[in-house]
């Protein structure tokens, strides 16, 4: 029996009371991560920045997703749009979810404050700058703009650091 893609259902459980929708499941993971970090003595403001938050665009402007400006440093991932939204040290960036090396979904490692590719272990700073691994360039950035209290991501304008350095450098909103 197939299940909708937004439900997490244990094997042989069907639609029992233990099934979770994806939003509740991800919220539980986020809460658990924050609790573990707090238990380790990590200040809450640092723990929040270390834990990626699942997000969805709250609306579209001209066909492009728009997201609330993050209130503090941290990472938000919109898997549906394949966008990573990052606020870091007074700037906001939007990245393609995939590693530029072989298109594997990147992961945020809050402990090191770096993105990492799980396939070949390329690492990137929060601003998308390449640090180490098999990749040969920084993360691919989308053009972004500020519209009031939102960041609008132009998903049709992706900049590759090695082919469009000027566009890559300009794909940032300073707060």
Image (cartoon, rainbow, N blue to C red):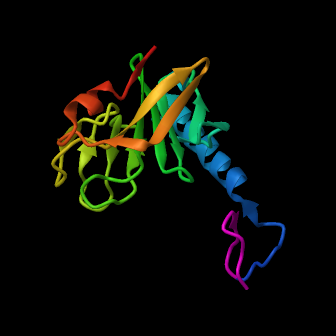
Please say whether residue 39 is one of the residues in the magenta stretch: no
| Rendered location of residue 99, percent (x, y) | 31, 53
Furthest toward the front, the residue is 62
Q: Is residue 109 visible?
A: no
Q: Which one is in front, 168 or 18?
A: 168
Q: Residue at x 62, y 43 (%)?
A: 56
Q: Is 46 placed left or right of 6 in the picture?
A: left
Magenta stretch, main secondary structure, is loop
Q: Residue at x 49, y 35 (%)?
A: 153
Which region shows up in magenta?
1-11
Q: Is residue 34 visible?
A: yes
Q: Is residue 13 above or below residue 102?
A: below
| Rendered location of residue 129, percent (x, y) | 24, 35
Q: Residue at x 33, y 58 (%)?
A: 118
- Rendering quarter of residue 69: top right
Q: Residue at x 19, y 42 (%)?
A: 163
- Rendering quarter of residue 151: top right
Q: Which one is in front, 138 or 21?
A: 138
């Amino acid at each position: 029996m197939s299940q909708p893609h937004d439900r997490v259902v244990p094997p042989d459980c069907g639609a029992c009371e233990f099934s979770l929708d994806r939003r509740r499941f991800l919220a539980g993971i986020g809460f658990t991560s924050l609790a573990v970090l707090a238990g380790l003595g990590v200040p809450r403001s640092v723990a929040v920045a270390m834990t990626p938050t699942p997000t969805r665009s709250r609306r579209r402007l001209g066909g492009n997703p728009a997201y609330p400006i993050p209130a503090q440093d941290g990472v938000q991932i919109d898997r549906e749009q394949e966008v990573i939204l990052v606020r870091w040290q007074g700037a906001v960036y939007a990245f393609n979810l995939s590693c530029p090396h072989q298109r594997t979904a990147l992961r945020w490692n809050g402990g090191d404050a770096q993105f990492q590719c799980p396939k070949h272990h390329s690492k990137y700073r929060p601003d998308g700058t390449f640090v180490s691994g098999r990749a040969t360039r920084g993360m691919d950035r989308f053009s972004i703009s500020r519209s009031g209290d939102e960041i609008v991501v132009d998903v049709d304008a992706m900049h590759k650091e090695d082919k469009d350095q000027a566009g890559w450098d300009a794909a940032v909103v300073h707060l």
